[in-house]
Amino acid sequence: MHWRRILRSTCRVLRRERFWLATASASQIPVTERATTLFSAQDLQALWLTLRLAATVTVLLLVLGMPLAWWLAHTHSRWRRPVAAVVALPLVLPPTVLGFYLLMLLGPEGAVGRLIAAAGLSALPFTFRGLVVASMLYSLPFVVQPLQNAFEAIGQRPLDVAATLGAGPLDRFCSIALPLALPGVVTATVLGFAHTVGEFGVVLMIGGNIPGQTRVMSMLIYDHVQAGEYHQAHVLSLCLLLVSFLALLAMSLLRPGRHPHD
C-alpha cells in the first residue's frame, strides 16, 4: 500500500541522513559537497528559484502594501470596506480560481496582456515575472492586514502630538508610526515570505512547471511524488517544513511581547 511505501521511505531518509551526518563529521566533508550529495541539480535550482521568488515578492509587497495598509487604517472613505474585501479575497478564494483569472487577464487575449503587448513587452504568463505578479496578489492579505492592524493600534494621539511639535506627514510616519508598528512589519514580512514559499495552485496556473524558470519547490515535490520518488520528496518537504518553522520562530523572537507573569 502507498502509506507503507511512504513510511518505509521516511525511515530510509532518516537513517541515511543520520549516517550521512555522522560520516561527514568524521571525514570533514565540505558543506558544498554534502549539499550536492543530498540535493540534485534540479532540487537546488528549484530551491534557489523559490527563495528568490519569496524574497522578491516580500520586498515588493512591503513597499506597495504599506501605503495601502496606512490608507485602510486611517481613511473614512466609503471605498474602505470594498477595498478591504478585495485585499482579503485571496484568503477565501481557491488558488486555482485566482490563477485562472490571472491567466486570462495577463494572457495575449486579456486586457492587461494586450496593453503589455502594445508596450512592446513580453507576455507575463509562464515567466518568472508572471510568478511575481501572481504571488504578490495571492500573498497580499498576509502583508497588508498585519500592517493595517499595527497602524490602527497606534491610534491618532501620538501622530497629533508630533504634528503639534511641527512634524510633517512623512516625518510623523517615519519617526512615529513606523517604529511603533515594527511588530506588525515583522509579522507581515515573515507571513508574506513563508506564504510565498508554500504556494502551489497559483504558480501552477500562471507559471506552469518550466525547469529553471517557473518550477518552484512545491511543484518539484509534486513531481517527485507523481514519479514515486519519495526520498527526494521527503528531503524537499523537510526543507520547506524547516523554512516555515524557522520563519514562525523568528517572528516570535523578533516581536516584542509580554511574558505570562507580567
Image: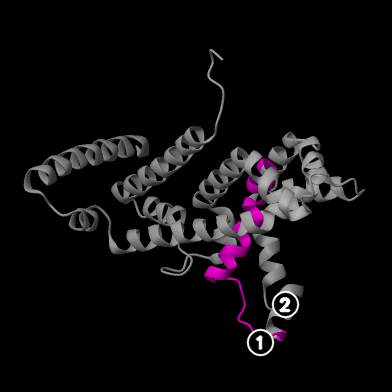
The residue positioned 22% from the left and 39% from the top of the image is 12
Residue extent of the magenta highlight: 118-146
Compared with 87, 132 (above or below) is below
Q: Nearer the viewer, residue 128 or 221?
A: 128
Q: Quadrant of the C terminus?
A: top right
Label 1 amino acid?
Answer: Gly
Viewer-proximal residue, 244 or 75? Answer: 75
Where residue 110 sits in the image (x, y, percent)? 73, 74
Relative to residue 201, is residue 105 drawn left or right? right
Q: Is residue 75 above or below residue 3?
A: below
Magenta stretch encompasses residue 260? no
State the residue lying farthest toward the left. Answer: 27
Q: Which residue is mark 2?
A: 109
Q: Tell me whether the residue at label 1 lies in contact with that at label 2, contact meaning CB atoms closer than 8 angstroms.
A: no
From the viewer's perspective, tell me whether residue 46 is left or right of residue 205.
left
Please tell me in which quadrant of the rendered image residue 165 appears.
top right
Q: Amino acid at mark 2?
A: Glu
Q: Earlier in the sequence, mark 1 or mark 2?
A: 2
Magenta stretch, main secondary structure, is helix
- Tag in front: 1 or 2: 1
